[in-house]
Image (spheres, helix red, strand yellow):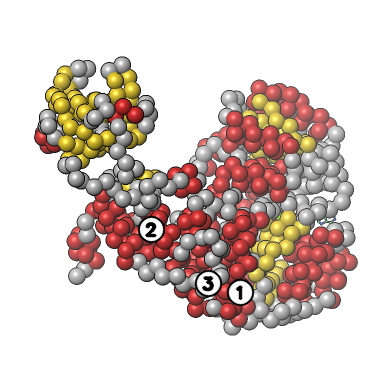
C-alpha cells in the first residue's frame, strides 16, 4: 500500500492523535488529564449553590420549547429535595425525546441560582434507571480538539494504559520512598478514586505526580550522562603547550583577573586530556571571555593544531578577528577569516590555507561549518554566544568534526548565564566554567528609566557627553520581525538626531548594510571620529569601545531582559562613569514596569537571568534548543529542584551498576528524543 493510500485509511481522530505524538501505548499512558469531572456522586438539588459544577439525578416533570428572547428548550427536573430548570439554546429532536416527561436522567453542569430558582444551561444528559451504577472513579478530561473528540480519546487512553508495559524497570531503592510504582501512579492519575484530595492533583504535589516527575528527570539525567560517557570514549588530541600562551601573556595590555586565571586553568586541564572537552564558559558581559579563548587557542596552536572560532554575526566575528590578530600576529601566527560575504577567489584562498594548515586560527560565522571547509588539523573549536546558535547548527558542527579520526575540543561561551537548575537539567553533560568577577577599574553603569516625552532632555545629555569628548550609542527599537520597518525607524531617528545635534558626527548601523560598510562605520566609531552611533540591535554583541559612556535604548519595553543586559554591556567598558537610558512609551503594563525596574536595580547578569526566567519561563529562555519539543512535560524546574537533585545524585550510580535498567528507563521516557538531547 502506498503512503497516501495508507493515510486515507486512517480516521480523522487517528491522524489527530498522531499529530499529538500519541503513537505508542506508553505515549497514551503518559497523556495525562488536564482536569477531572466528578460523576461518582449525585447531589440533591436543594444542596446546589451558585457556581457549583455538579451531577443531579431526577425525573423530568416538564419539557417544552418556549420562545423567550430566543427559541429554547426548557425542562424541569425534580428529585426528592426540589426542582431544577435545564435550558438548551441548541437542541435536536433527539434531545427532546431523551428528556420526555417521565424519563429519569442524570445531568451534569454548572449551577446558576437566579431569580427563577436553580438552573443549568446545556448540561450533559444521560438516560438512567434506578439501578444505573455511578462512576467508580473521577472522569478524566484530556486536552482534545475538534478532530479528536473527548470520548474517542478517553477510550484510546484507557486502552493504551491497559496495554502499555508499565512494569517497574528501576531497581528497588532508586525511587524516593513514599512514591507509588509507575503503573499505580498512572492508573491513579487517569482514574482517581472518589474523595481524593483534588488540590494535590491540581498542584501536582500528589505522590503520583511526584513519581512521574522523578522518572522524567531521571531519564533526562541518564541520557545526558550517557552522552557524556560516549564522548569520553572518543579521542581528541592532547593539547599541551606553555610557550605560546606565555608569549601571548607578555603582549597583553593587562594581567588576568583571578577568575580568568581559574577558568584558564580549568580549560587547560581539559585540553591536556586525550578526550574531547565539552565546556561552557559563562561570564557576564565585559568579564573578559575573549582573552580566555585566545589563551586556549594559543595552547592548541602551540601544540601544533588549528583553532576555529565561530561567532553568530559578522560584526562579532570581526571584533574577535581584530582583537585576536592584535594579540596573535606578534607571535607570528596566521589568521584566516571566513564569513558569508567572503566569496570567490578570496574564499578559495582562505580554504586552501585552512586545508594546508597554514592558517593556525580560523575566525568566522556559520561559514566556518560549511561543507567545503576542510581543516588540516582542527584541535579546538570555540563557539561564542553559543545560545544564539540553534540545535541544528551545533549538530552540524559536531558532525563536521566527526569527519576526522580525532574529535576536536569544544569550548562554548555565553554571556547569558544559565540558572543553576537549567544548567543541571539541560546541560548536565557540559562542564561549566564561570568568570564571576569583572576586570578592575570598571565603574558600574547607572541605568535610568524615562518615558518617551523626556526625549529632549536625553538629547541634551548627549550634547553634554559629546562636549566632554565621550561617545554615545542610540539603539533603535525592534518594531517587529520585519527588518525593513526597523530600518525605516533607524533611518528616521538618524535624520532627527543629526538635525538636533549640529556639528556632531552621527553614524548609522543596521543589519541590511553590506559587511564592508558596517566595518567602515564601526571603524569610524572605534577610532573616535564619530561621536554618536544610531544602530539597530546589530550592536548587541561584541562591540568594544571603551570611550562610549552613554547608551540610549528606545522602546526598551520591547526588548527581553537578557538582551537589554547585553546591550547595556556595550557601555561602562572603560574607567569613565557610564549611563544607560531606557526610554519607554506609555502606558506600560505592570510586568513591563517590573522588568524595566529590574534593569535599573541590578547590573548583575546572573540576577537578571534569574528574573528573566521567572517572567518568561524556561521554554523561551532556552530558545532554539527546545524548539518543537518541550523536553520536560511533567517536571517544573522552578518547583522540583529537590527531585532534580535526587535524580542527579542517583543517575551516575544507576548507570554504573545497572546499565540495562538505565537504558530501559531512558528508552521508555525519551524514545527517539535521546539523540536530540546530545546536541
Ligand atoms: P566579554 O566577556 O563580554 O566577551 P571581552 O572579552 O570583550 O568581554 O572583554 C571586555 C573588555 O575587557 C575588553 O576590552 C578586554 O580587552 C578587557 N579585559 C579583559 N580582561 C581584562 C583584564 N583582566 N583586565 C583589564 N581588562 C580586561
Ligand atoms: Mg564577548
Which residue is depicted at the point 69% across and 34% down?
597
Q: Is residue 341 visible?
A: no
- Which residue is under mark 1? 653
Which of disc 3 and disc 1 is earlier in sequence? 3
The residue tagged 2 is 187
Up the image or down, 150 lies above or below 249; here it is: above
Rendering coords of residue 132 (x, y %): 20, 46
**Element assignment for label 1:** helix
Residue 53 x/y as whole percent: 35, 34
Q: Which mark is residue 172?
A: 3
Nearer-N-terminus badge (1/2): 2
- Give yes or no for contact between labels 2 and 3 (Cβ–Cβ under 8 Å): no
The vertical placement of 476 against 243, above or below, is above
Of tags 1 and 3, the one toward the viewer is 3
Give percent across and percent down for residue 222.
Answer: 55, 69
Mark 2 surroundings: few (<14), some (14-19) or many (≥20) residues within 10 A: some
- Marking on residue 103: none
Amino acid at each position: 500500500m502506498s503512503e497516501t493510500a495508507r493515510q486515507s485509511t486512517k480516521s480523522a481522530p487517528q491522524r489527530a492523535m498522531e499529530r499529538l505524538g500519541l503513537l505508542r501505548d506508553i505515549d497514551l499512558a503518559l497523556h495525562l488529564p488536564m482536569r477531572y469531572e466528578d460523576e461518582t456522586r449525585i447531589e440533591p438539588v436543594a444542596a446546589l449553590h451558585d457556581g457549583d459544577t455538579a451531577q443531579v439525578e431526577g425525573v423530568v416533570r416538564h419539557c417544552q420549547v418556549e420562545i423567550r428572547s430566543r427559541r429554547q428548550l426548557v425542562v424541569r427536573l425534580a428529585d426528592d429535595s426540589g426542582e431544577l430548570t435545564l435550558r438548551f439554546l441548541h437542541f435536536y429532536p433527539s434531545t427532546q425525546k431523551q428528556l420526555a416527561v417521565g424519563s429519569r436522567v442524570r445531568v451534569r453542569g454548572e449551577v446558576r441560582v437566579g431569580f427563577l430558582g436553580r438552573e443549568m444551561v446545556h448540561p450533559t444528559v444521560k438516560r438512567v434507571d434506578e439501578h444505573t451504577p455511578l462512576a467508580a472513579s473521577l472522569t478524566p478530561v484530556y486536552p482534545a480538539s475538534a478532530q479528536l473528540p473527548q470520548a474517542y480519546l478517553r477510550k484510546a487512553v484507557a486502552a493504551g494504559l491497559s496495554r502499555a508495559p508499565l512494569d517497574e524497570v528501576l531497581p528497588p531503592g532508586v525511587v524516593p520512598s513514599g512514591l507509588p510504582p509507575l503503573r499505580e501512579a498512572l492508573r491513579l492519575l487517569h482514574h482517581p478514586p472518589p474523595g481524593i484530595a483534588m488540590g494535590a492533583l491540581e498542584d501536582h504535589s500528589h505522590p503520583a505526580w511526584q513519581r512521574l516527575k522523578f522518572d522524567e528527570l531521571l531519564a533526562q539525567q541518564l541520557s545526558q550522562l550517557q552522552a557524556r560517557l560516549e564522548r569520553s570514549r572518543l579521542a581528541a588530541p592532547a593539547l599541551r603547550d606553555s610557550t605560546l600562551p606565555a608569549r601571548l601573556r607578555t603582549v597583553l595590555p593587562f594581567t588576568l583577573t583571578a577568575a580568568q586565571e581559574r577558568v584558564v586553568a580549568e580549560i587547560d586541564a581539559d585540553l591536556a586530556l586525550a578526550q574531547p572537552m565539552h565546556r561552557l564558559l559563562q561570564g557576564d558581559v565585559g568579564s573578559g571571555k575573549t582573552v580566555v579563548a585566545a589563551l586556549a587557542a594559543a595552547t592548541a596552536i602551540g601544540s601544533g593544531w588549528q583553532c576555529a572560532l565561530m561567532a553568530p554575526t559578522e560584526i562579532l566575528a570581526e571584533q574577535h578577528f581584530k582583537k585576536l590578530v592584535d594579540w596573535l600576529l606578534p607571535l607570528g601566527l596566521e589568521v584566516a577569516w571566513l564569513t558569508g560575504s567572503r566569496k570567490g577567489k578570496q574564499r578559495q584562498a582562505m580554504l586552501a590555507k585552512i586545508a594546508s594548515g597554514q592558517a593556525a586560527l580560523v575566525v568566522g560565522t556559520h561559514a566556518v561549518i560549511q561543507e567545503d571547509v576542510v581543516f588540516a588539523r582542527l584541535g579546538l573549536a570555540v563557539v561564542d554566544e553559543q545560545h544564539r546558535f540553534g540545535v541544528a547548527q551545533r549538530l552540524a558542527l559536531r558532525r563536521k568534526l566527526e569527519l576526522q579520526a580525532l574529535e576536536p575540543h569544544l569550548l562554548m561561551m555565553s554571556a547569558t548565564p544559565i540558572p543553576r537548575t537549567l544548567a543541571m537539567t539541560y546541560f548536565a553533560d557540559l562542564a561549566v566554567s564561570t568568570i564571576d568577577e569583572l576586570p578592575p577599574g570598571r565603574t558600574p553603569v547607572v541605568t535610568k528609566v524615562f518615558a518617551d516625552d523626556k526625549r529632549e532632555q536625553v538629547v541634551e545629555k548627549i550634547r553634554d557627553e559629546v562636549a566632554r569628548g565621550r561617545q554615545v550609542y542610540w539603539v533603535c527599537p525592534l518594531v517587529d520581525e520585519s527588518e525593513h520597518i526597523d530600518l525605516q525607524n533607524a533611518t528616521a531617528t538618524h535624520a532627527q538626531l543629526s538635525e538636533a545635534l549640529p556639528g556632531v558626527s552621527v553614524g548609522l548601523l543596521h543589519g541590511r548594510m553590506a559587511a564592508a560598510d558596517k566595518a567602515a562605520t564601526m571603524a569610524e566609531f572605534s577610532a573616535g571620529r564619530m561621536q554618536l552611533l544610531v544602530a539597530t540591535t546589530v550592536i548587541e554583541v561584541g562591540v568594544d569601545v571603551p570611550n562610549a559612556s552613554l547608551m540610549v535604548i528606545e522602546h526598551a519595553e520591547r526588548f527581553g531582559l537578557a538582551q537589554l543586559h547585553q546591550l547595556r554591556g556595550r557601555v561602562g567598558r572603560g574607567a569613565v562613569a557610564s549611563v544607560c537610558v531606557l526610554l519607554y512609551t506609555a502606558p506600560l503594563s505592570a510586568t513591563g514596569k517590573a522588568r524595566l525596574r529590574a534593569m535599573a536595580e541590578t547590573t548583575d547578569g546572573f540576577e537578571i537571568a534569574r528574573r528573566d526566567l521567572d517572567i518568561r519561563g524556561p521554554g523561551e529562555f532556552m530558545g532554539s534548543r527546545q524548539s518543537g519539543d518541550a523536553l520536560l512535560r511533567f517536571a517544573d524546574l522552578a518547583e522540583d529542584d529537590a527531585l532534580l537533585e535526587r535524580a542527579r545524585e542517583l543517575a551516575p550510580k544507576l548507570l554504573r551498576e545497572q546499565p540495562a535498567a538505565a537504558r530501559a528507563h531512558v528508552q521508555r521516557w525519551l524514545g527517539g528524543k535521546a539523540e536530540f538531547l546530545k546536541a
